[in-house]
Amino acid sequence: MSQTITAIVPTYNRAVYLAEALAAIAGQTRPVDEIIVWDDGSSDATETVARAAAGPVRYFKSANGGKSRALNAAMAEATGSLIWICDDDDIALPHAAETLGALLGAHPEAGVAGASYRRFQSDPESGTRIEQGPGYWPDLSQGSVLRHLLEDIFLFQNATLVRRSAYDAVGAFREDLPRSIDYDMIIRLALHTTVVML
């Protein structure tokens, strides 16, 4: 059975980044089936940018309630069997969905496919993009992914594709945490299911 991908983009007052993030998702070599933009009460041009974006975008807006609440609400709307969460300042490489989807396809026992990523910033004077490695990255040839995650987070949502069934099994994002909700969730997922890594 063919797997469908829902990309979820939670956002709040970051219209300046959102267009590029959405264009990167819409331009994947394996097209995503649905892009849900959840606007967490923005007062900038977020809605205009989201509605102008190419691809199968569904736009929702709610009162500001934090990222966890936005993700939980978007998850309730998602129709894909695979979930890809991308922040509004993430720029996916063109083959990201294809690569992560193929990894899950090759490992039906796994609930999460993960990969590395590059951090970047723009030079304030020239605007040139400066890329760096992922920061902390463990030696995955030894020990389990879970062990390495418990030592330090190295795997982030934009670099993971997760089976919807795995998210359903571990429950919603915790809305009582002021930060590190991605860390909490990846640990819960790694406790529940196999994580396969590139």
Image (cartoon, rainbow, N blue to C red):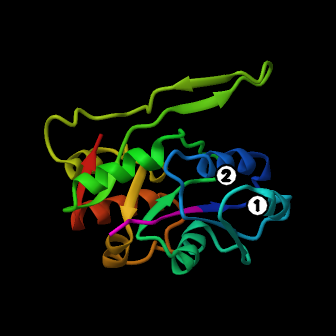
Q: Where is residue 51, by image quadrant?
A: bottom right
Q: Dot 1 corresponds to which residue?
A: 50
Would you say the residues marked 1 and 2 are in contact, meaning their CB atoms lie under 8 Å apart?
A: yes
Asked if residue 195 lies in the magenta stretch, the reply is no
- Which sits earlier in the primary sequence, circle 1 or circle 2? 2
Q: Dot 2 corresponds to which residue?
A: 22
Name of the residue lying farthest toward the top: 126
Up/down of 41 relative to 13, above or below: below
Residues drawn in magenta? 1-8
At x 49%, y 32%, the residue is 118
Up/down of 185 relative to 195, above or below: below
Secondary structure, mark 2, is: helix
Q: Where is residue 45, by image quadrant?
A: bottom right
Q: Position of residue 139 (x, y in %)?
A: 23, 32
At x 63%, y 52%, the residue is 26
Q: Position of residue 189 (x, y in %)?
A: 30, 64
